[in-house]
Amino acid sequence: MKLGFVSAILPDLPLEEVIQFASETGYSCVELMCWPKGRAERRYAGVTHVDVAGFKSSDAQKIRAVLKDAAVSISSLGYYPNYLTPKVDEAKAVTGHFKKVIAAAALLGVGQVTTFIGRDWTKSVEDNWPRFRKVWAPLVRFAEDHEVRIGIENCPMLFTNDEWPGGKNLAHSPRIWRRMFEEIPSKHFGLNYDPSHMIWQQMDYIKPLWEFKDRIFHVHAKDVRLDRDRLDDVGILATPLQYHSPKLPGLGQVDWGRFCSVLGETGYDGPVCVEVEDRAYEGSLETRKAALRQSARFLRQFIP
Protein backbone atom coordinates (compact mmCIF):
# COMPACT_ATOMS: atom_id res chain seq x y z
CA MET A 1 0.00 0.00 0.00
CA LYS A 2 1.04 3.60 -0.59
CA LEU A 3 0.62 6.24 2.11
CA GLY A 4 -0.64 9.60 0.85
CA PHE A 5 -2.78 12.57 1.80
CA VAL A 6 -5.65 14.61 0.38
CA SER A 7 -4.41 17.99 -0.86
CA ALA A 8 -7.58 19.86 0.20
CA ILE A 9 -6.00 20.60 3.59
CA LEU A 10 -3.23 22.67 1.92
CA PRO A 11 -5.19 25.21 -0.16
CA ASP A 12 -2.57 27.88 0.59
CA LEU A 13 0.16 26.05 -1.31
CA PRO A 14 0.69 25.72 -5.05
CA LEU A 15 0.99 22.25 -6.55
CA GLU A 16 4.80 22.27 -6.55
CA GLU A 17 4.97 23.00 -2.81
CA VAL A 18 2.31 20.39 -1.99
CA ILE A 19 4.34 17.74 -3.81
CA GLN A 20 7.59 18.86 -2.21
CA PHE A 21 6.00 18.75 1.25
CA ALA A 22 4.75 15.23 0.56
CA SER A 23 8.25 14.15 -0.40
CA GLU A 24 9.89 15.76 2.64
CA THR A 25 7.30 14.24 5.00
CA GLY A 26 7.64 10.69 3.70
CA TYR A 27 4.39 10.43 1.77
CA SER A 28 4.40 8.36 -1.41
CA CYS A 29 1.39 9.92 -3.13
CA VAL A 30 -1.16 12.74 -3.04
CA GLU A 31 -4.83 12.94 -4.00
CA LEU A 32 -4.92 16.24 -5.86
CA MET A 33 -8.00 18.44 -5.76
CA CYS A 34 -9.44 19.66 -9.06
CA TRP A 35 -12.29 22.01 -8.21
CA PRO A 36 -13.09 24.80 -10.66
CA LYS A 37 -11.41 28.01 -9.64
CA GLY A 38 -13.71 30.20 -7.59
CA ARG A 39 -15.41 30.55 -4.23
CA ALA A 40 -16.02 27.36 -2.27
CA GLU A 41 -19.49 26.56 -0.95
CA ARG A 42 -18.28 24.37 1.92
CA ARG A 43 -15.19 23.48 3.94
CA TYR A 44 -12.47 21.60 2.03
CA ALA A 45 -14.11 22.37 -1.32
CA GLY A 46 -12.98 24.86 -3.94
CA VAL A 47 -9.32 23.75 -3.80
CA THR A 48 -7.59 23.71 -7.19
CA HIS A 49 -4.19 22.04 -7.30
CA VAL A 50 -4.78 20.84 -10.86
CA ASP A 51 -6.75 23.23 -13.05
CA VAL A 52 -8.44 20.92 -15.55
CA ALA A 53 -10.03 23.71 -17.59
CA GLY A 54 -8.25 23.59 -20.94
CA PHE A 55 -5.86 20.94 -19.62
CA LYS A 56 -3.40 19.85 -22.32
CA SER A 57 -0.64 17.28 -22.80
CA SER A 58 1.94 19.99 -22.13
CA ASP A 59 0.30 20.67 -18.73
CA ALA A 60 0.48 16.97 -17.93
CA GLN A 61 4.16 16.87 -18.87
CA LYS A 62 4.97 19.73 -16.48
CA ILE A 63 3.16 18.03 -13.60
CA ARG A 64 4.84 14.69 -14.31
CA ALA A 65 8.21 16.41 -14.16
CA VAL A 66 7.41 17.85 -10.71
CA LEU A 67 6.30 14.43 -9.51
CA LYS A 68 9.39 12.70 -10.88
CA ASP A 69 11.77 15.14 -9.19
CA ALA A 70 10.04 14.59 -5.83
CA ALA A 71 9.55 10.81 -6.25
CA VAL A 72 5.85 11.27 -5.45
CA SER A 73 2.86 9.97 -7.43
CA ILE A 74 -0.77 11.07 -7.80
CA SER A 75 -3.15 8.64 -6.11
CA SER A 76 -6.17 10.17 -7.78
CA LEU A 77 -7.67 13.42 -9.04
CA GLY A 78 -10.38 14.46 -6.60
CA TYR A 79 -13.59 16.45 -7.16
CA TYR A 80 -16.58 16.09 -4.81
CA PRO A 81 -19.74 17.97 -5.89
CA ASN A 82 -23.39 16.88 -6.00
CA TYR A 83 -24.24 15.51 -9.45
CA LEU A 84 -27.82 14.68 -8.46
CA THR A 85 -28.73 18.10 -7.09
CA PRO A 86 -32.24 19.22 -8.01
CA LYS A 87 -30.70 22.47 -9.30
CA VAL A 88 -30.53 21.70 -13.02
CA ASP A 89 -27.91 24.30 -14.00
CA GLU A 90 -25.61 23.25 -11.15
CA ALA A 91 -25.94 19.57 -12.04
CA LYS A 92 -25.06 20.28 -15.67
CA ALA A 93 -22.02 22.36 -14.68
CA VAL A 94 -20.54 19.86 -12.23
CA THR A 95 -21.08 16.95 -14.61
CA GLY A 96 -19.28 18.83 -17.37
CA HIS A 97 -16.39 19.67 -15.06
CA PHE A 98 -16.10 16.05 -13.91
CA LYS A 99 -15.60 14.94 -17.49
CA LYS A 100 -12.66 17.36 -17.65
CA VAL A 101 -11.24 15.80 -14.47
CA ILE A 102 -11.50 12.35 -16.06
CA ALA A 103 -9.82 13.56 -19.26
CA ALA A 104 -7.01 15.18 -17.24
CA ALA A 105 -6.46 11.95 -15.30
CA ALA A 106 -6.07 10.12 -18.60
CA LEU A 107 -3.52 12.65 -19.87
CA LEU A 108 -1.57 12.39 -16.62
CA GLY A 109 -1.61 8.61 -16.73
CA VAL A 110 -3.18 8.54 -13.27
CA GLY A 111 -6.02 6.25 -14.25
CA GLN A 112 -8.20 7.16 -11.29
CA VAL A 113 -10.58 9.87 -10.09
CA THR A 114 -12.43 10.14 -6.77
CA THR A 115 -15.78 11.78 -6.10
CA PHE A 116 -19.34 11.44 -4.72
CA ILE A 117 -22.46 10.07 -6.39
CA GLY A 118 -24.50 13.01 -5.16
CA ARG A 119 -28.14 12.97 -4.09
CA ASP A 120 -31.34 14.98 -4.16
CA TRP A 121 -31.48 15.30 -0.37
CA THR A 122 -35.20 16.17 -0.42
CA LYS A 123 -36.09 12.73 -1.83
CA SER A 124 -35.91 9.17 -0.54
CA VAL A 125 -33.16 6.78 -1.58
CA GLU A 126 -35.59 4.93 -3.83
CA ASP A 127 -36.67 8.12 -5.58
CA ASN A 128 -33.03 8.98 -6.36
CA TRP A 129 -32.37 5.85 -8.45
CA PRO A 130 -33.82 7.11 -11.77
CA ARG A 131 -31.50 10.15 -11.66
CA PHE A 132 -28.60 7.93 -10.62
CA ARG A 133 -29.01 5.78 -13.72
CA LYS A 134 -29.52 8.73 -16.03
CA VAL A 135 -26.46 10.64 -14.79
CA TRP A 136 -23.98 7.91 -13.90
CA ALA A 137 -24.32 5.37 -16.72
CA PRO A 138 -22.94 7.85 -19.30
CA LEU A 139 -20.28 9.15 -16.88
CA VAL A 140 -18.98 5.64 -16.28
CA ARG A 141 -18.94 4.98 -20.04
CA PHE A 142 -16.96 8.21 -20.49
CA ALA A 143 -14.46 7.01 -17.87
CA GLU A 144 -14.21 3.60 -19.55
CA ASP A 145 -13.46 5.29 -22.88
CA HIS A 146 -10.57 7.14 -21.18
CA GLU A 147 -9.40 4.03 -19.24
CA VAL A 148 -9.97 5.82 -15.94
CA ARG A 149 -11.54 4.29 -12.82
CA ILE A 150 -14.03 6.19 -10.64
CA GLY A 151 -13.84 5.72 -6.86
CA ILE A 152 -16.98 6.86 -5.00
CA GLU A 153 -16.51 8.00 -1.41
CA ASN A 154 -18.94 6.59 1.17
CA CYS A 155 -19.52 9.90 2.98
CA PRO A 156 -23.27 10.62 3.38
CA MET A 157 -22.65 14.40 3.22
CA LEU A 158 -25.14 14.79 6.02
CA PHE A 159 -23.59 17.27 8.42
CA THR A 160 -25.26 20.66 8.17
CA ASN A 161 -28.84 21.91 8.09
CA ASP A 162 -28.80 22.53 4.32
CA GLU A 163 -27.95 18.83 3.80
CA TRP A 164 -30.80 17.62 5.99
CA PRO A 165 -32.69 15.28 5.94
CA GLY A 166 -31.30 12.98 3.21
CA GLY A 167 -27.69 14.09 2.82
CA LYS A 168 -26.03 14.92 -0.49
CA ASN A 169 -24.34 11.62 -1.34
CA LEU A 170 -26.33 8.48 -2.05
CA ALA A 171 -23.46 6.01 -1.66
CA HIS A 172 -23.27 5.68 2.11
CA SER A 173 -24.06 2.01 2.87
CA PRO A 174 -23.26 -1.52 1.65
CA ARG A 175 -26.86 -2.10 0.53
CA ILE A 176 -26.70 0.96 -1.71
CA TRP A 177 -23.25 -0.02 -3.07
CA ARG A 178 -24.60 -3.42 -4.08
CA ARG A 179 -27.38 -1.81 -6.06
CA MET A 180 -25.01 0.73 -7.62
CA PHE A 181 -22.76 -2.03 -8.91
CA GLU A 182 -25.69 -4.18 -10.01
CA GLU A 183 -27.11 -1.35 -12.09
CA ILE A 184 -23.70 -0.23 -13.40
CA PRO A 185 -21.47 -3.35 -13.27
CA SER A 186 -18.46 -1.70 -14.89
CA LYS A 187 -15.02 -2.63 -13.56
CA HIS A 188 -14.20 1.09 -13.79
CA PHE A 189 -16.78 1.93 -11.09
CA GLY A 190 -15.84 1.39 -7.44
CA LEU A 191 -15.29 2.90 -4.01
CA ASN A 192 -13.10 5.42 -2.24
CA TYR A 193 -13.52 3.83 1.18
CA ASP A 194 -13.40 5.85 4.43
CA PRO A 195 -13.87 3.74 7.59
CA SER A 196 -14.74 6.73 9.77
CA HIS A 197 -18.10 7.27 8.05
CA MET A 198 -19.14 3.74 8.91
CA ILE A 199 -18.49 4.29 12.62
CA TRP A 200 -20.71 7.32 13.10
CA GLN A 201 -23.44 5.59 11.10
CA GLN A 202 -23.22 2.69 13.61
CA MET A 203 -21.96 0.21 10.96
CA ASP A 204 -19.11 -2.30 10.88
CA TYR A 205 -16.16 -0.83 8.97
CA ILE A 206 -14.29 -4.15 8.55
CA LYS A 207 -16.92 -6.39 6.91
CA PRO A 208 -17.16 -4.37 3.67
CA LEU A 209 -13.43 -4.79 3.05
CA TRP A 210 -14.04 -8.42 2.10
CA GLU A 211 -17.36 -8.10 0.27
CA PHE A 212 -16.20 -5.15 -1.83
CA LYS A 213 -12.52 -6.04 -2.11
CA ASP A 214 -12.65 -5.86 -5.92
CA ARG A 215 -14.42 -2.49 -5.80
CA ILE A 216 -12.18 -0.61 -3.37
CA PHE A 217 -9.98 1.55 -5.58
CA HIS A 218 -8.83 4.17 -3.06
CA VAL A 219 -8.92 4.62 0.73
CA HIS A 220 -9.24 7.72 2.92
CA ALA A 221 -7.55 7.59 6.32
CA LYS A 222 -9.65 9.67 8.67
CA ASP A 223 -10.62 8.86 12.25
CA VAL A 224 -13.74 9.77 14.21
CA ARG A 225 -14.74 10.18 17.82
CA LEU A 226 -18.34 9.61 18.89
CA ASP A 227 -19.49 11.60 21.92
CA ARG A 228 -21.82 9.17 23.68
CA ASP A 229 -23.14 11.81 26.10
CA ARG A 230 -24.11 14.10 23.23
CA LEU A 231 -25.62 11.21 21.28
CA ASP A 232 -27.69 10.24 24.32
CA ASP A 233 -28.87 13.86 24.49
CA VAL A 234 -29.68 14.61 20.83
CA GLY A 235 -30.27 11.13 19.33
CA ILE A 236 -29.30 9.73 15.92
CA LEU A 237 -31.81 11.95 14.09
CA ALA A 238 -29.82 15.08 14.93
CA THR A 239 -27.34 16.50 12.41
CA PRO A 240 -24.35 14.19 12.95
CA LEU A 241 -21.79 16.85 13.84
CA GLN A 242 -23.77 17.32 17.05
CA TYR A 243 -22.49 13.96 18.28
CA HIS A 244 -19.30 13.12 16.40
CA SER A 245 -16.00 14.77 15.51
CA PRO A 246 -13.58 13.94 12.66
CA LYS A 247 -10.11 13.27 14.05
CA LEU A 248 -6.59 12.49 12.86
CA PRO A 249 -5.74 8.79 12.45
CA GLY A 250 -5.02 7.37 15.89
CA LEU A 251 -7.06 9.96 17.79
CA GLY A 252 -10.46 8.34 17.34
CA GLN A 253 -12.19 4.98 17.32
CA VAL A 254 -10.81 3.29 14.19
CA ASP A 255 -8.56 0.33 15.02
CA TRP A 256 -5.95 1.12 12.36
CA GLY A 257 -3.83 -1.96 13.01
CA ARG A 258 -6.82 -4.24 12.42
CA PHE A 259 -8.11 -2.16 9.52
CA CYS A 260 -4.80 -2.14 7.65
CA SER A 261 -4.21 -5.82 8.41
CA VAL A 262 -7.55 -6.90 6.93
CA LEU A 263 -7.24 -4.43 4.05
CA GLY A 264 -3.91 -6.01 3.15
CA GLU A 265 -5.31 -9.53 3.49
CA THR A 266 -7.97 -8.72 0.88
CA GLY A 267 -5.18 -8.03 -1.61
CA TYR A 268 -5.49 -4.25 -1.60
CA ASP A 269 -2.18 -2.54 -2.42
CA GLY A 270 -3.40 0.89 -3.49
CA PRO A 271 -3.29 4.34 -1.88
CA VAL A 272 -4.31 5.12 1.69
CA CYS A 273 -4.63 8.90 1.86
CA VAL A 274 -4.87 10.89 5.08
CA GLU A 275 -7.83 13.25 5.02
CA VAL A 276 -7.37 15.97 7.64
CA GLU A 277 -10.70 17.35 8.86
CA ASP A 278 -9.77 17.66 12.53
CA ARG A 279 -10.72 21.18 13.65
CA ALA A 280 -8.07 21.09 16.38
CA TYR A 281 -5.42 21.32 13.64
CA GLU A 282 -7.01 23.85 11.28
CA GLY A 283 -5.78 27.06 12.88
CA SER A 284 -2.88 27.75 10.51
CA LEU A 285 -0.83 26.32 7.68
CA GLU A 286 1.76 25.14 10.19
CA THR A 287 -0.76 23.25 12.33
CA ARG A 288 -2.22 21.60 9.22
CA LYS A 289 1.27 20.55 8.14
CA ALA A 290 1.85 19.26 11.67
CA ALA A 291 -1.34 17.20 11.37
CA LEU A 292 -0.01 15.55 8.22
CA ARG A 293 3.36 14.85 9.83
CA GLN A 294 1.72 13.33 12.90
CA SER A 295 -0.61 11.21 10.75
CA ALA A 296 2.31 9.91 8.69
CA ARG A 297 4.27 8.90 11.80
CA PHE A 298 1.26 7.06 13.19
CA LEU A 299 0.21 5.23 10.02
CA ARG A 300 3.75 4.16 9.11
CA GLN A 301 3.38 1.56 11.88
CA PHE A 302 0.92 -0.24 9.59
CA ILE A 303 1.92 0.94 6.10
CA PRO A 304 5.72 0.66 5.96
Image (cartoon, rainbow, N blue to C red):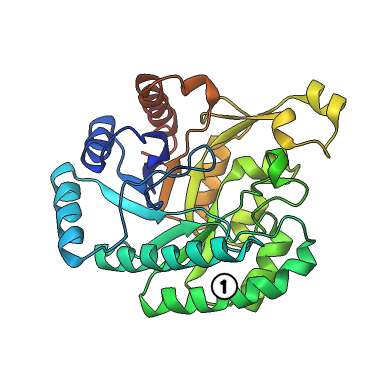
Placement of the C terminus among the 4 image quadrants: top left
Residue, x 20% and y 48% (percent of image)? 67
Residue, x 34% and y 45% (percent of image)? 30
Residue 164 at x, y = what percent? 75, 45
Picture quadrant where residue 91 is located: bottom right
Task: Depth check: give the residue in front, 154 or 268.
Answer: 154
> On screen, 199 above or below 136?
above
From this viewpoint, is residue 213 visible? no
Crowd band around label 1 with a 10 angstrom C-alpha radius: few (<14), some (14–19), many (20+): some
Q: Is 264 placed left or right of 300 in the picture?
A: right
Residue 235 at x, y = what percent? 85, 33
What residue type is disc 1 on? Trp
Q: Is 44 placed left or right of 20 in the picture?
A: right
> On screen, 187 above or below 67?
below
Residue, x 40% and y 43% (percent of image)? 47
What is the tally of numbered marks visible in this picture?
1
Query: Which residue is denoted by mark 1 in the rendering?
Result: 136
Task: Depth check: give the residue in front, 170 or 268.
Answer: 170
